[in-house]
Image (cartoon, grey):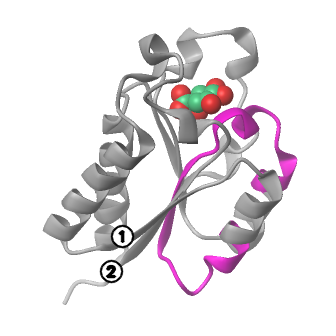
Amino acid sequence: MRILFLNGPNLNLLGQREPHVYGRATLADIEAGVRMRAVRMGVGVDFRQSNVEGELVSWIQQAKGEFDFIVLNAAAYTHTSIALRDAISAVGLPTIEIHLSNVQAREQFRHHSCIAPVCSGLIAGFGADSYYLALEAAINVNAEKRPAA
Ligand code: DQA
C-alpha cells in the first residue's frame, strides 16, 4: 500500500507560523513522524508540500496508479479551490482531508471546504496527530476494501 501526503500553501512555515494555532512542530518533524509510523505499519509514503495550487493539482492527477490513498492538507486552498476538488473527483482516489487546527472553531471563512464533498472523510484539530490519525484511517479503510483471504 502507498499513501501520498500532500501539503498546501504556508505549511512549509510550520514551527514558526502562528505556533499558538499550529503548534511548534515543523513540517519536517511531522514528515518524520509519519514516516516512522508508516515503516512500523508496513506502508509506503510520499510526503510533499507546495505553495502552488496547480502543482498540487498535477500531483493529484499523477497519483493515479502510483498510490492507493491521498491525505491532503490543502491549507487555505481548502476554502477556495474548485480546481483541487475537481482533481480529486476526476482521479477517483480515496482522499482524506486533514487540518492541524479545528477549522470549525475558527473564522467563518474556514468553515467551508470545497474539497470535503469529494473526500472520504475529514480529520481536524489534533495538530500533528491529524496526520498520524489519517495514516491509520487510510490503512484501516484499505484493509476493509480487500477481499478476505
Ligand atoms: C489549515 C487550516 C486552514 O484554514 C489554513 O488556511 C491553513 C492550515 C490547518 O492545517 O489547520 O493554512 O489547513
What's under tag 1, amino acid-wise? Asn
Few, some or many residues within 10 Å of mark 1 (<14, 14–19, 20+): some
Tally of numbered discs? 2
Taking the view exactly as shown, the residue that stands out farthest to the left is 40
Few, some or many residues within 10 Å of mark 2 (<14, 14–19, 20+): few
Q: Which mark is residue 142?
A: 1
What's under tag 2, amino acid-wise? Arg
Residue position marked by numbered label 2 in the rendering:
146
Front position among marks 1 and 2: 1
Image coordinates of residue 61 in percent, x first then y, are 72, 74
Which residue is at the front of the view, 61 or 140?
61
Which residue is at the front of the view, 14 or 21?
14
Magenta-drawn segment: 60-85
Quarter of the image for the N terminus: give it: bottom left
**SS for callout 2:** loop
As drawn, is 105 to the left or to the right of 9? left
Taking the view exactly as shown, the residue that stands out farthest to the front is 16
104 vs 136: above or below: above
